[in-house]
Image: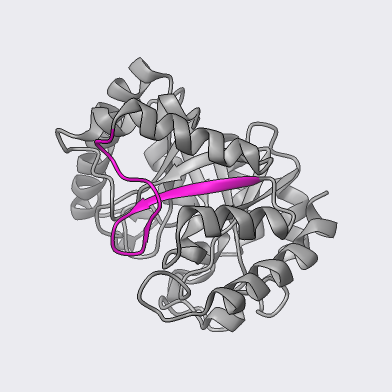
């Protein structure tokens, strides 16, 4: 399995600095972020030549694009969404990784509430509409189950996938969000086993022992420095053929946090050293 790194870690630095750092640390793929407030490494609405130049920069470092990261920067209901898909096609990015949206549901008597079902239906309709557009460009959508949204657990993933276009929509599985679901928190390893048939992309990081919603410190997210069972997660990840890459995604070093480039590089290299033996 390939190890990837999200450019969000280098959100305050240029794309060239980012690619150099990721390649230096031995990663083989990237999530290229189009997130203006956090990691503006991909801008939408540029000429085709701009995207070809980025594609060549990435390839020159021996890297591939696992996905375009669009949470908070790409709206699937915007009139500009086709421009995002066109950029992805030119770049050779097979997937756009996005958040689900909606609100998490109240589970009562082993069934979801009507309010939750209504919220989920709105999310499903948006995703299926976006998938129709994405299919025209040959680009898939990978949706992250996220604390506080309509897709946040094994049951909600399975419920959503029942109505989604599974050819073009899959799951961007980040076990730390399963871990951080408070009183409803599940075992991220067991949840991955239940939903792995729907997974398109994988994210990997550690987390503090607390199961509360807020993410832990940067230090506790560094693989091997938190409480999550990453060896067990990696073992399951390696069985998912259509997700050949696990991508490091740590938040807290992004644009505006003031992290020095050298400090970010140290985190990225520590993470690679821990994860490579688990994934290869």
- Residue extending furthest toward the top: 136
Residue 176 coordinates in the image, percent (x, y)? 54, 66
Residue 29 coordinates in the image, percent (x, y)? 63, 44
Residue 23 coordinates in the image, percent (x, y)? 68, 53
User: In the rendered structure, does residue 130 fall within the stretch colored magenta?
Assistant: no
- Residue extending furthest toward the left: 79
Whether residue 208 is visible to the viewer of this picture, yes or no, is: no
Q: Residue 26 falls in which quadrant of the image?
A: bottom right
Q: Is residue 88 left or right of residue 173?
A: left
Q: Nearer the viewer, residue 175 or 7?
A: 7
Q: Nearer the viewer, residue 228 or 46?
A: 46
Whether residue 62 is visible to the viewer of this picture, yes or no, is: yes
The colour scheme is: one colour
Image quarter (top left, top right, bottom left or bottom right) of the N terminus: top right
> Residue at 35% of width from left, 76% of height from top?
256
> Residue at 40% of width from left, 41% of height from top?
159
Q: Residue 209 falls in which quadrant of the image?
A: bottom right
Instruction: Count the marks.
Output: 0
Q: Is residue 251 left or right of residue 4?
A: left
Q: Is residue 81 left or right of residue 144?
A: left
Position of residue 174 relative to residue 124, above or below, is: below
> Residue at 79% of width from left, 66% of height from top?
273
| Part of the protein shown in magenta | 29-46
Q: Residue 277 falls in which quadrant of the image?
A: bottom right
Residue 66 coordinates in the image, percent (x, y)? 56, 40
């Amino acid at each position: 399995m390939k190890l990837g790194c999200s450019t969000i870690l280098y959100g305050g630095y240029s794309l060239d600095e980012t690619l150099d750092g990721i390649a230096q640390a031995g990663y083989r793929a990237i999530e290229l972020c189009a997130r203006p407030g956090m990691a503006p490494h991909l801008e939408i609405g540029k000429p085709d030549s701009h995207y070809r130049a980025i594609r060549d920069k990435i390839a020159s470092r021996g890297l591939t694009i696992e996905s375009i990261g669009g949470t908070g920067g790409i709206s699937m209901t915007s009139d500009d969404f086709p421009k995002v898909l066109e950029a992805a096609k030119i770049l050779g990015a097979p997937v756009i990784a996005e958040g689900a949206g909606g609100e998490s549901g109240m589970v009562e008597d082993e069934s979801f509430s009507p309010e939750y079902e209504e919220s989920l239906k709105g999310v499903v309709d948006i995703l299926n509409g976006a998938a129709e557009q994405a299919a025209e460009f040959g680009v898939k959508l990978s949706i992250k189950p996220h604390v506080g949204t309509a897709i946040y657990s094994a049951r909600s993933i399975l419920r959503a996938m029942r109505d989604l276009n599974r050819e073009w929509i899959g799951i961007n599985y980040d076990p730390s969000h399963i871990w951080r679901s408070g009183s409803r928190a599940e075992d991220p390893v067991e949840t991955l086993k239940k939903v792995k048939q729907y997974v398109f992309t994988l994210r990997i990081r550690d987390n503090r022992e607390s199961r509360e919603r807020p993410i832990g410190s940067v230090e506790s997210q560094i693989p091997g420095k938190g409480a999550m069972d990453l060896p067990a997660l990696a073992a399951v990840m390696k069985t998912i053929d259509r997700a050949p890459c696990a991508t490091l995604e740590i938040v807290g070093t992004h644009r505006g946090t003031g992290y020095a480039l050298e400090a970010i590089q140290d985190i990225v290299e520590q993470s690679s050293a821990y994860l490579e033996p688990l994934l290869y």
